[in-house]
Amino acid sequence: MSGERVAVIPGDGIGPEIMDATIGILEATGFKPEWVYLDAGLAAIEKGKEAVPKETIEAIRQIGVALKGPTTTPKGGGHSSANVTIRKALDLFANVRPVKTLPGVQGPFAHMDVDIIIVRENTEGLYAGIEYQPHPDVAQSIKVVTRQGSHRLFKYTFDMARKQGRKRVTLVHKANIMKLSDGLLLEEFYKAAEENTDLESNDVLVDNCCMQLVTRPQQFDVLVTENLYGDIISDLCAGLVGGLGLAPGANIGTDCAVFEAVHGSAPDIAGKGVANPTALLLSALLMLRYLGRHEQADRILGSVLRVCKDGKCLTMDLGGKANTKEYTREVISCSTP
Ligand code: NAD
């Protein structure tokens, strides 16, 4: 891993707009690595390449760290998801998605003090990509849960929770119905819990968890779960703290990591210059921390918090009137001495 080179995938839709904004803020505050631009998603397909060209995977593997914009995935048949391909090819097994109430951001849950880290299993479950059609009228998707995959997910989660000063890890599952797949997950979770008795552990069924998240989200600290539930729950949690424009993420593997927002390519607002770059920026701050650049991350975070609290230069998704460039300038002016 090198601190001097960072792979960049601008992505599709709003991806290039929010990537420019994010890199502008990082550079203005003194983080100026060599940005190695790589193709993936529709941008790659339009150049006649695969959705994730082999050279993109190899470059991320070599560089060790990547900042990725959202990529568009066609619905139904056609190309497979660039995200799923990258996560599987690089074995990025843990998708870490912190959600935290930001001062000044309005919304139905603004009065609740939400501070949850979601850890989503990133390579197995129903996203393992094993689908087939044994008959024209029947389609099947196989859900994969492995003992080894569950073990490393829970080990990572408990270690991360401890490092971050967290108190409780909750497994989200549906082992009452999927007795074998989620049952194995539950079994491995409590094995890991026995090795981490300094942290509290409990479990909750995914449907009950969703209801609890919108009634009493403050009770949750770290949520760990399989791939599909994690995908859905993290969008729900993003809604609790002001929407997808504020939800960052990190895809963590053994040797490399890819940082990207929870949200997608937002085709409805692409090219209008109004996208909120905060989710990608906060993902970049997770990257700075991964690289050990905590001072820089703290400074930019302080600036984002000031801009949000002040409330005069917010993007439209947060009820403001600022466009992407105006918001970016404001964050830069608050974070440079
Ligand atoms: P989306 O997350 O792109 O958009 C959902 C809604 O949130 C839209 O109304 C959008 O305008 C809004 N939104 C999202 N990000 C925003 C931002 N930064 N600022 C302001 N508003 C924002 O979800 P979708 O429309 O279901 O998906 C669009 C495409 O993105 C699909 O092809 C999907 O497969 C893909 N996708 C990619 C990723 C990824 O690359 N990691 C993740 C999710 C979805």
Image (spheres, rainbow, N blue to C red):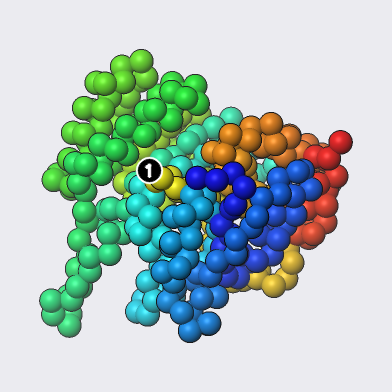
Residue 281 drawn at (x, y percent): 65, 49
Q: Nearer the viewer, residue 172 or 32?
A: 32
Q: Is residue 101 above or below residue 33?
A: above
Q: Is residue 188 left or right of residue 43?
A: left
What residue do we see at 46% from left, 79% from top?
A: 49
Q: Which residue is mark 1?
A: 254
Q: Is residue 182 above or below residue 136?
A: above
Residue 68 drawn at (x, y percent): 55, 58
Callout count: 1
Quadrant in the rendering for residue 103: top right
Question: Callout 1: helix, strand or loop?
Answer: loop
Mark 1: few/some/many CA within 10 Å (<14, 14-19, 20+): few
What residue do we see at 27% from left, 64% from top?
A: 129
Q: Is residue 303 above or below residue 251?
A: above
Residue 114 drawn at (x, y percent): 55, 33
Where does the C terminus fall, quadrant-wise?
Answer: top right
Q: Is residue 35 left or right of residue 158?
A: right
Camera sees residue 200? yes
Q: Is residue 97 left or right of residue 188?
A: right
Kindly tell me whether mark 1's CB lies below 8 Å from ligand 1: no
What residue do we see at 72% from left, 39% from top?
A: 300
Q: Nearer the viewer, residue 204 or 272?
A: 272
Query: Looking at the picture, which amino acid does disc 1 mark?
Result: Thr
Q: Is residue 43 above or below residue 317?
A: below
Residue 254 drawn at (x, y percent): 38, 43
Camera sees residue 236? no
Q: Is residue 157 left or right of residue 188?
A: right
